Image: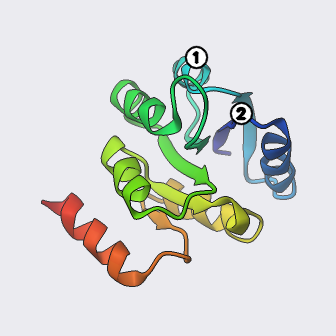
Amino acid sequence: MPKVLVVDDHAFIRRGVQAILQSVPEWEMCGEADNGKDAVRLAGELKPEVIVMDVSMPGLNGIEATRSICKNNPGTKVVLLTLHESDELLRNGFQAGARGYLIKSDAEDELLKALRVVIGSGSYISPRFNQDTVNSLIGSLAK
């Protein structure tokens, strides 16, 4: 059963992700954090297979936390969960080591799909993104 760490500075988002995960017995929520600094620490302590991480948090943001986590815990996969439909944040997130990018408004329908794809060594990008943007990102990361 894959362990999931949830990181968001808003408790109601953490509770929502937890509720989605609890609806399916294949996932175990192993912890939560409300900032990037604690996410980095807990990633080392709890060794989750996947981290669902907000991008915009005070202090250490989700992209910088992702960069640190992926460097120090290469087996941990990060799915960024955000309000921002930004090509630049998408690109920066994947360059930092994220394996998924999910828009919060899609999370109820897409979170479990994103986690399954990422845990299966794939990459997941919210369906809201234009396919040309996705193809461009994949091409730039392959270089």
Q: Residue 4: horizontal and vertical position, in percent?
A: 66, 40
Looking at the image, is 118 positioned above or below residue 1?
below
| Gap in angstroms between the C-alphas marked 2 and 1 | 20 Å
Q: Where, by quadrant of the figure, is residue 20 drawn?
A: bottom right
Looking at the image, is 102 positioned above or below residue 135?
above
Residue in the image at 59% along x and 42% along y: 53
Badge 2: few (under 14), some or many (20 or more) residues near its Cα, within 10 Å?
Answer: some
Left or right, residue 70 beside residue 138: right
Residue in the image at 55% along x and 77% along y: 127
Looking at the image, is 108 positioned above or below residue 38?
below
Under circle 2, the secondary element is loop
Under circle 1, the secondary element is helix
Q: Nearer the viewer, residue 3 or 127?
A: 127
Q: Where, by quadrant of the figure, is residue 102 drawn?
A: bottom right
Residue in the image at 38% along x and 34% along y: 67
Q: Which residue is mark 2?
A: 9
Q: Which residue is mark 1?
A: 45
Q: Residue 132: horizontal and vertical position, in percent?
A: 33, 82
Left or right, residue 88 beside residue 79: left
Q: Nearer the viewer, residue 32 or 13?
A: 13
